[in-house]
């Protein structure tokens, strides 16, 4: 069976978005509640996510993106604070 444009776009976006966030299929399965087998077969074109499963996967991807953005923001803030800090008695203040 040849995938339709929509099926291909869903598979490609799932795999590329998951990979861009550094998530394994197993981690995405744990975070979304969708079985890893279903994520795998969807990425390979052998299955499609139900609407409910797609909603759960999208929500998990969005949570991970927000978590990474917050971590990057925190790292940037801490780095900026550290570079402006001065050393007193062997400790930054």
Image (cartoon, rainbow, N blue to C red):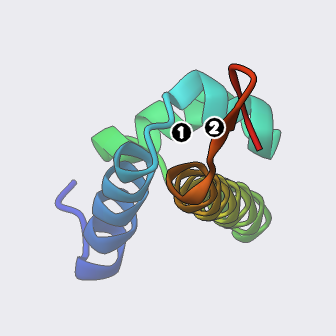
Seen in the picture, residue 61 relative to 18 is either above or below; the reply is below
Q: Position of residue 54 (x, y in %)?
A: 66, 64
Q: Quadrant of the C terminus?
A: top right
Mark 1 is surrounded, within 10 Å at the Cα level, by few (under 14), some (14 to 19) or many (20 or more) other residues, namely many
> Residue 10 vs residue 30: left or right?
left
- Between the C-alphas of marks 2 and 1, the distance is 8 Å
Asked whether the beta carbons under mark 2 and mark 1 sit within 8 Å of each other, the answer is yes
Q: Secondary structure at mark 2?
A: helix
> Looking at the picture, how far across and down is residue 77, in whole percent?
63, 63
- Decide: is 93 above or below 10: above
Q: Position of residue 82 (x, y in %)?
A: 59, 49
Residue 49 in view in this figure = no
Numbered disc 1: secondary structure:
helix
Q: Label 2, on which residue?
A: 28
Q: Is residue 49 left or right of residue 40?
A: right
In the image, residue 27 sits, relative to residue 20, either above or below, namely above
Residue drawn where x is 62% and y is 46% of the image: 86
Please tell me which residue is depicted at 62% across the width and 51% down the height of the picture.
85
């Amino acid at each position: 069976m040849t995938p339709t444009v929509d099926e291909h776009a869903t598979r490609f976006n799932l795999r590329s978005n998951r990979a861009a966030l550094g998530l394994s299929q197993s981690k995405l399965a744990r975070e979304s509640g969708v079985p890893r087998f279903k994520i795998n077969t969807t990425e390979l074109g052998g299955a499609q996510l139900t609407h409910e499963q797609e909603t759960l996967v999208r929500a998990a991807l969005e949570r991970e993106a927000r978590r990474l953005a917050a971590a990057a923001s925190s790292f940037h803030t801490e780095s900026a604070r550290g570079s402006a800090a001065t050393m007193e008695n062997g400790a930054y203040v």
